[in-house]
Amino acid sequence: MPLSCKPHAGPITVLVADADVMACRLLAGGLRRYRQLRVLECHLPPADLLKHISEMRPDILLVGNTLPDGPLGGFGLVREIRRSSPEIGVVVLLESSQRALVVEAFRAGAKGVFCRADFEFRRLCKCVSSVIQGQIWANSQQLQFVMDTLSKAAPLQVVNSEGVGLLTKREEDVVRHVVDGLSNREIAEQLRLSEHTVKNYLFRIFEKLGISNRVELVTYVITNIERLATERGTIEKAAVENHSPTRSNDPRFLNSAAGHAEFRGTRAGVVRP
């Protein structure tokens, strides 16, 4: 079956890596119908998979976000590939287009996201074709998630409903780096800590915020971004109507809404399925 794309030196090598062995085989089998694709599959743990990728040097990696190391195993692998083999186009296979998952995938360095709920081989092949041309693959909703995150300021302080800080300064530093898409090792390097210490900080953060993983932490931060933006807009509107000063001049309020959530991974263009 022909695949429409710009000229490429030889067949496009696609490596499929997923926690679900049967799903991985079915996906690889379906893609092999397209003669321009050389399709490989891998069911190794993330650590071994990274070595396998460095040896195979695929053009495109289709990777599930739920590898054996946990819900964020796939994202951790994407970050490592971005660091060691940035020329590989990574597409993350998501179980759903949840906002936090989409944003985290692109922060990790993905060139595209593909939702299994909307699965169709023709669309997936179009995704591969687009990414090999240096474009970004995302539908309108997924792109909007990323744009919304870019347009809003991430709070430096995580506070409760009364404005009381819940985290220490060092814990806030760790949160900031998690939101920026850094791995535990990268955070340790940035903060001059051991990786074990960073893990301990994350456990304490999870306990204080009542969450259990990094995806929930990113979701928590995004929710607070939206809450602060809504709160600020409501207060400023009320101030205009009442001709009274606003909290936007209060340094404490400004500090709580400072910072910026950085989106990484955008290249030449965006393709909307």
Image: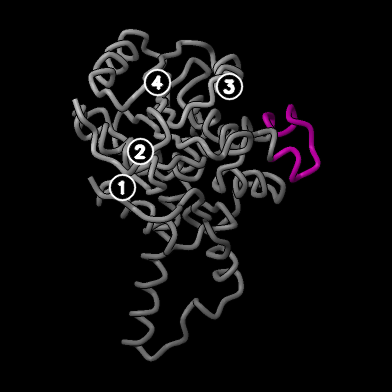
The residue identified by callout 3 is: 50
- Mark pair 1, 3: CA separation: 27 Å
40 vs 95, left or right, is right
Q: Please say if the residues under marks 2 and 4 sit with CB atoms less than 8 Å apart.
A: no
- Asked whether 122 falls inside the magenta stretch, the response is no
Could you tell me the amino acid type at mark 2?
Val
Q: Name the residue under label 2.
A: 113
Figure check: 125 above or below 131 = above
Residue farthest to the bottom? 243
Residue 193 shown left or right of residue 240 in the figure: right
The image quadrant of residue 175 is: top right
Farthest residue to the top: give it: 22
- Residue that mark 1 sits on: 142
Q: Distance between the residues labelled 3 and 2?
A: 20 Å
For the stretch drawn in magenta, what is the main secondary structure? helix
257 or 114, nearer to the observer: 114
Labels 1 and 2: the sequence-earlier one? 2
Q: In the rendered view, tell whether residue 165 sits above or below residue 207.
A: below
The three-letter code of the residue at mark 3 reads: Leu
Q: Say which residue label 4 marks.
A: 16
Name the secondary structure under disc 1: helix
In the rendered structure, are the residues bearing label 1 and label 2 in contact, judged by CB atoms less than 8 Å apart?
A: yes
C-alpha separation, residue under disc 2 versus residue under disc 4 = 14 Å
Where residue 123 sits, quadrant-wise, is top left
Circle 4 or circle 1, nearest the eye? 4
Counting from the top left corner in percent of width and height, residue 122 is at 19, 31
What span is in magenta?
187-200
